[in-house]
Image: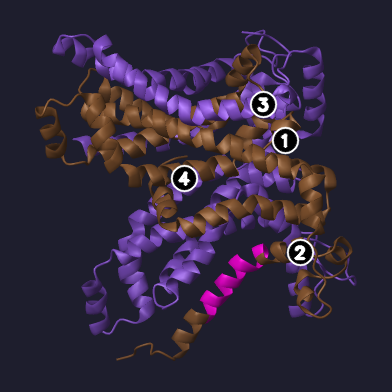
Amino acid sequence: MSGAGSIRSPGGRAGRVSARARRAEGTVASPAKENAVNIILMLAVAVVGVPLLLVGYIRLSEPLAGRKPRRAALMRPWLWLAPTLVLLAVFLVYPVVATMVESLENADSTAWVGLSNYAAVFTSPDNLSALGNNVLWLVFFTLGTLLFGLLVAVLSDRVRYESAVKALVFIPMAISFVAAGIIWKFMFEFQPAGEIQVGTVNAALTAAVPGFKPIAWLVNTTTNNAALIAVGVWMWTGFAMVILSAAIKAIPPDVVEAAKIDGASELQIFRLVTLPLVAPTLGFVATTLMINVLKVFDIVYVMTNGNLGTDVIANRMYKEMFNYHNTGLASAIATFLLICIVPVMIVNIRRYRRGVA
Amino acid sequence: MMRTGKFGPGRLFVHLALVVACLVFLLPTLGLLVSSFRPRNLISLSGWWTAFQTPFTFTLKNYQNVLTRANMGRSFLNSLIISIPATVLPVSIAAFAAYAFAWMKFRGKEILFVVVIGLLVVPIQMTVIPVLRLFNIVHLTGTFAGIWLAHTAYGLPFSIYLLRNFIQDLPPSMLESAFIDGASHPKVFLDLVLPTSLPAIASLAIYQFMWVWNDLFVALIYLGGTEDVAPMTLTMANMVNSYGGGWEYLTAAAFISMAFPLLVFFTMQKYYVTGILAGSVKE
């Protein structure tokens, strides 16, 4: 394994400088040399050439697999899978194992340090604060997204403009976290009390609530995490809504009719019929949301970069790796993320096995 | 019998709640869009909602500036250059693998597919340090080829999973009769399976394209230091850091980056939602 200095920061302001330095040293291929002609050529190769190459490879591999049908049947699957297996091995399987190994090594991967990186994950103040914030995200993001998703799904089911409402609520799913971060930074803009509020949130509250003092949502340490989580909920509500709405529509209409004939109120129908019937879907959506929120990165990176007590573990990993060049600790944080996700992995595999059997 | 009638208080609540929901989901994006057409000094002096009062002062200058000066024009191209191959490559490689998993018999197939399902949820964070080391050795850091390869590999498990489920469900009689007629595997795959799978391939391609287009993390890791290859997400993230409150740039930049996904969303909503629903097993 190459030692210190082989991994240098890409992102951030400091990162850009060091990449320029790397290029000056000649250790990194200069992308400036990728002129227009080269790029078009490469694009053509990737978009047209590779698929054609694959087709040619599969056609040619038929005689290669052998003339005897039994030998061919033995060889053929592996020839078809070869490109996939190579890519998965290089970019996923090997790196996962290597990261686990490095999580037991020191900052520049030159000596074994046992489990001390893991100890740092659970003891250093920065990491503890990030872990605490991840728990906040896990609870409030998941609950908020489920609640709003369910609310929109249930209510829009009763009106004629349902598809319009759903399209609007779903739009944030189509844009990047970065764009959403910018949108909401603008929403949370803050000016001291008495000045004109340009941010929608402060302006609306100033107008609606008498004596309201504008809040610096992203700076104030009691509100900043809530503000970031709200952005996450805003982005993902559409996802929960689409899946829950499909589940609600799958409820047989005669069940609801029967309850109505028995004199159940709308609220009772929701509590006693709808909710139990969509409970498995709720569980499924909650799991998906939780896996995603464990890795939350973009929103925090763009809106606060984890400052003022808003850091999360994925961002901590990034900082350890690129700002402090502590490969060992960064690997331990990544491995911790993986360990949190392993139960979901097992559930997925079980579900697949059951489907096969 | 108590029923919530068409105009009862319950009904009113439903409409009211939905209107509020629509506003909450529309206003933030609308505010950004309106602001991106307002002159710089007005953005910081008055709320975007005042733009609809006379005098109407709108301008295209923000877009002009951001495209020419802030590297967004280049970044828009880069986003395209990154996203198109990073969609075509995983989808085409996965199609062959999915066919093999669905219609060929071989030892270790089950275990291999379980591995693919396991890889579906592996956090990308878990892979970046060793992959970056490799990239530095073979000089792929900061290049389009490098990020194409990375996105291709990261997209493979889900692509294989989705396509294999679809191809598996094709009627066996259809394939068997082709085999009886003496067709080879490549022929059955290219002439029969591929054309029938186009709806699934479309959903997958749109899903993967949006994922890559909106990605920040992978670009930050493998292209982070190099402006000339940075996609829009990366350029915008850098702009937030360096401009701070330069809203005339940020609003226009954000809207340029959103325009393409929104277009895809509105024209191909059906396929995209199918992809999202199927994709909910991922991550």
Question: Circle 2 sits on which residue?
Answer: B35
Query: Can you tell which of label 3 and label 2 is closer to the viewer?
Result: 2
Q: Residue at x 51, y 42 (%)?
A: B209
Residue A355 falls in image quadrant: top left
Chain painted purple: A
Chain where mark 2 sits: B
Question: Circle 1 sits on which residue?
Answer: A126
Q: Residue at x 83, y 53 (%)?
A: B245
Q: Nearer the viewer, residue A147 or A197?
A: A197
Badge 4 density bin: few <14, some 14–19, many ≥20, Cα 10 Å: many
- What amino acid is labelled 2 in the image? Ser
**Mark 2: secondary structure:** helix
Residue B66: x and y, percent?
Answer: 78, 49
- What amino acid is labelled 3 in the image? Ala
Q: Nearer the viewer, residue B42 or B81?
A: B81
Q: Are marks 4 and 1 in contact (CB under 8 Å)?
A: no
Q: Quadrant of the N terminus of chain A?
A: top right
In the rendered image, residues at marks 3 and 2 fall on the same chain: no
Q: Residue at x 58, y 75 (%)?
A: B20
Mark closer to the chain start, 1 or 3: 3
